[in-house]
Image (cartoon, grey):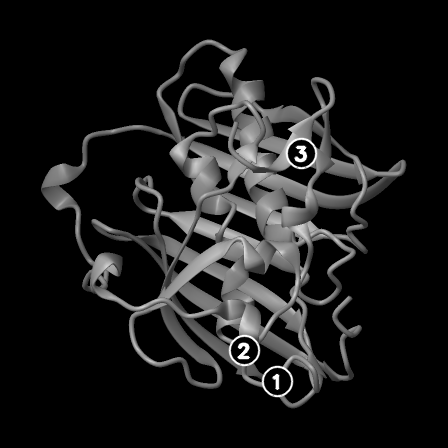
Amino acid sequence: MNEAYFERVDERRFRPTAHTGGGWDPTELHFSPLGGLIVHAIERHRAGSPENGMLLGRISFDILGRLSSDECEIVVTTARGGRTIELVDAIVRIAGRDVARAHAWYLTETDTTSVAGGGPDPLAEPDTLARWQMSSMWPGGFVASLEVRPVRPLQPGRATAWVTTAVDLVAGEVASPLASYVALIDIANGLGARERPDEWMFPNMDLTIHLHRQPGGHWVGLDTTTTFGPSGQGVTSTVLHDVAGPVGFANQVLTVRPGRRPPRP
């Protein structure tokens, strides 16, 4: 059995492994694999409903507080059913406290091949690029589990890179390409850092993903720009790619403040 980010305890509860350790505090969960786990839970919930030919168009996550590295429970409900659109909500609880919420819009699948277009050019293929050790900048088990291949040299507030992992999402379970893809997107804020994370803190409070095409393959392309404002706010914006080209966009709002993260364990 391959290594995994989570182990299933029962239908709604999961136990994180050492591969989920966060960049700001390695004793906390990195949100990125948790985001993928939420999608995995939503897909299992929807699998119990009649097939309606819908695809994920948007998912938004709100991070409500500290993500302690403990067993988590994910409760999924259908907030708005329908034949052409559907809204599914999820709540993540740790130690009886709500720590994250998600809202996922599913849209009916229609053949629009004849009018498709408008996205940016594809990125250089990852197989042609050299690896970069992201763990040289960030601690934590999640970053250590990644393979990162920059498309061009990283600059403060600007990063274009491919990311993949050999670690499964849930032990003994086959996650969909979409859930596995989402599990790597939240790393964008760390890749596009404007300042050194041992001098400034800039954690994201949310992650919103919009898709115009369903992603495939095991590589996630992140073309990321991070902007800091003058009053403690920032935004990380990312064009999302797979090896076939662009698939959508992601945005994260940041709380920016001077300070130092805890030392490496």
Type of amino acid under label 1 = Arg
What count of labels does the image hold? 3
Q: CA distance from mark 2 to mark 1?
A: 7 Å
Q: Position of residue 235 (x, y in %)?
A: 56, 73
* Foreground: disc 2 or disc 3: 2
Q: Secondary structure at mark 2?
A: loop
Classify the position of the C terminus by image quarter.
bottom right
Q: Earlier in the sequence, mark 3 or mark 1?
A: 3
The residue lying at 42 percent from left, 79 percent from top is: 158
- Contact (Cβ within 8 Å) of mark 2 with mark 1: yes
Relative side of 236 to 130, left or right: right
Q: Could you classify mark 3 by the number of other residues whose Cα lies within 10 Å: few (under 14), some (14-19), or many (20 or more)?
A: many
Residue holding disc 2: 193
- Contact (Cβ within 8 Å) of mark 2 with mark 3: no
Q: Earlier in the sequence, mark 2 or mark 3?
A: 3
* Foreground: disc 3 or disc 1: 1
Which residue occupies the foreground of this view, 246 or 219?
A: 219
Residue holding disc 3: 90
Q: Secondary structure at mark 3?
A: strand
Q: Position of residue 243 (x, y in %)?
A: 24, 51
Residue 232 seen in the figure: no
Type of amino acid under label 3 = Ala
Q: CA distance from mark 2 to mark 3?
A: 29 Å
The residue lying at 52 percent from left, 81 percent from top is: 227
Say the numbered circle drawn on residue 215: none
**259 over 89 or under it: above or below:** below
Which residue occupies the foreground of this view, 16 or 109?
A: 16
Residue 16 seen in the figure: yes
Type of amino acid under label 2 = Ala
Q: Could you classify mark 2 by the number of other residues whose Cα lies within 10 Å: few (under 14), some (14-19), or many (20 or more)?
A: many
Residue holding disc 1: 196
